[in-house]
């Protein structure tokens, strides 16, 4: 295995992105006969044991993208109205680690989740009501709306589609995986122009 381990993008048979899997999970999918086809570049050759009858060693070649037989889970994620779970890591990546009040980029440890309409004013903890804010701006805004605090919101929060969410949850996304994911983003997605970051 190489120094850093790449994640493998798992899709359903129609090509809808589902999730990231480890190379070990991908080998299990091959062994279970669930891989319908692969695309992307070859990432790994995993060598297994030697067959007692033939004397040949088993080898599984793993590409960066594997399509697997569908499931109820896959159909749910592709349906209209599906909302991915909200978590800070995905939120900060959605907003590109920018404070959407001051416009500066920060490391994750200096960021927080801000409710545009505060919970205390009947706002909800939903994708379209939360933005990334540096701790200083969030403390300044406190329990007020941006208007009440004299702040201007730099971008409108949005609910990511499942394909966008898969991108947001990825680590060290390879160029071919990013190209594949981008093809599933809505045309209006702000993530379409995002540059790859490690």
Image (cartoon, rainbow, N blue to C red):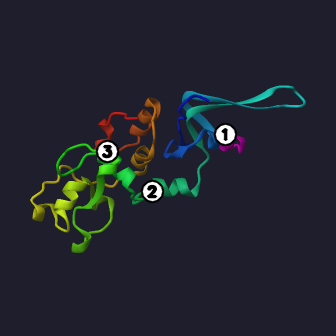
Q: Main secondary structure of the magenta part?
A: helix
- Asked if residue 197 is positioned above or below residue 154 in the image, the reply reads above
* CA neighbours of label 2 inside 10 A, class few (<14), some (14 to 19), many (20+): few
Q: Which mark is residue 107?
A: 3
* CA neighbours of label 1 inside 10 A, class few (<14), some (14 to 19), many (20+): some
* CA neighbours of label 3 inside 10 A, class few (<14), some (14 to 19), many (20+): few
Residue 132 on image: x %, y %? 27, 53
Residue 179 on image: x %, y %? 42, 33
- Between 98 and 193, the one nearer to me in the picture: 98
**Of label 1 and label 3, which has the lower sequence position?**
1
**Of label 2 and label 1, which has the lower sequence position?**
1
Residue 134 on image: x %, y %? 24, 52
- Asked if residue 116 is positioned above or below residue 90 in the image, the reply reads below
- Asked if residue 7 is positioned above or below residue 72 in the image, the reply reads above
Specify the quadrant of the image occupied by residue 158: bottom left
Judged by depth in the image, the label closer to the viewer, 2 or 1, is: 1
- The answer for how far apart the CA atoms under marks 3 and 2 are is 34 Å
Residue position for label 2: 79
Residue position for label 1: 27
- The answer for how far apart the CA atoms under marks 2 and 1 are is 28 Å
Look at 15% across and 60% down and name the residue there.
146
> What is the secondary structure assignment of the residue under circle 3?
loop
Judged by depth in the image, the label closer to the viewer, 1 or 3, is: 3
Tell me where the magenta segment starts and ends, as one range: 27-34
Is residue 171 visible in this depiction of the protein? yes
**Of label 3 and label 2, which has the lower sequence position?**
2
């Amino acid at each position: 295995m190489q120094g850093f381990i790449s994640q493998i993008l798992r899709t359903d048979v129609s090509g809808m992105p589902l999730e990231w899997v480890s190379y070990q999970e991908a080998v299990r999918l091959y062994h279970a006969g669930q891989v319908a086809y692969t695309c992307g570049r070859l990432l790994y050759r995993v060598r297994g044991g030697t067959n007692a009858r033939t004397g040949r060693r088993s080898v599984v070649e793993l590409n960066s993208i594997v399509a697997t037989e569908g499931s109820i889970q896959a159909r749910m994620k592709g349906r209209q109205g599906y909302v991915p779970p909200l978590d800070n890591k995905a939120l900060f990546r959605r907003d590109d680690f920018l404070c959407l009040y001051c416009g500066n980029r920060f490391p994750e440890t200096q960021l927080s989740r801000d409710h545009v309409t505060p919970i205390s004013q009947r706002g909800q903890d939903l994708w379209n009501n939360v933005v990334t804010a540096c701790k200083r701006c969030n403390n300044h805004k406190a329990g007020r709306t941006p208007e009440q605090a004299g702040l201007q919101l730099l971008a409108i929060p949005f609910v990511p589609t499942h394909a966008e969410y898969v991108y947001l949850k990825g680590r060290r996304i390879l160029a071919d995986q990013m190209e594949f994911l981008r093809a599933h983003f809505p045309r209006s997605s702000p993530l379409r122009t995002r540059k790859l970051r490690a």
